Image (cartoon, grey):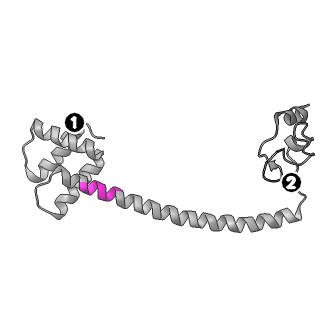
Amino acid sequence: MMDSQQVRQLLAVVIAYDNRKLADANILAWTEAARRGRWTLAEAVDAVHEHYASQSVWLMPGHVSATIRARRQDLAQREQAGYQIAAAAEVRELVAGVGRHVDDVAEHEPAPVPSKWRSACPHCHAGPGAPCVRPSRDAAPVALANVHPSRLNVAAS
């Protein structure tokens, strides 16, 4: 966000184009517009140059805000499109990698059992290599992502 000193710098650029008179009221008004529009000095100066490169109407803060807003929206759309292209390429790469990984796994030994699952669980009685489970009212026991603390104690000893 621009401060009043940066607004003075911006208005110096504007004055170079249209010879307006600099007054405290102008600085206050333009500072408020810059705050509301969250302008940066670079964005605002570029918007002033763009305005006077294409039109001769008296520049108002709303012109600067509109130009900055349009540029930010355009940049956001371009970034979104770039992200979507990158995401699609990443998905294709991951899918291709899965096929390679499956082939690699088939040629090698199975992955080792995590150390936390090498022993039986004294709490739920899950066997070595099997995940811990919790009871379920509706169906078979539900496998847990983590292990019971008592199983970790057994694995640590």
Q: Residue at x 69, y 67 (%)?
A: 95
In this picture, residue 105 sits left or right of residue 37:
right
Q: Which residues are magenta?
A: 66-72
Residue identified by numbered label 1: 4
Q: Which secondary structure, mark 2?
A: loop
Q: What separation in Å lies between label 1 and label 2 (alpha carbons)?
A: 64 Å
Residue at the far front: name it: 137
> Looking at this view, is 114 or 126 the one in front?
126
Q: Earlier in the sequence, mark 1 or mark 2?
A: 1
Quarter residue 32 falls in: top left
Quarter residue 23 falls in: top left
Q: Residue at x 25, y 49 (%)?
A: 44
> Would you say residue 39 is visible in this rendering?
no
Question: Disc 2 residue type?
Answer: Ala
Q: Is residue 105 magenta?
A: no
Q: Position of residue 72 (x, y in %)?
A: 35, 56
Q: Residue at x 46, y 65 (%)?
A: 81
Q: Which secondary structure, mark 1?
A: helix
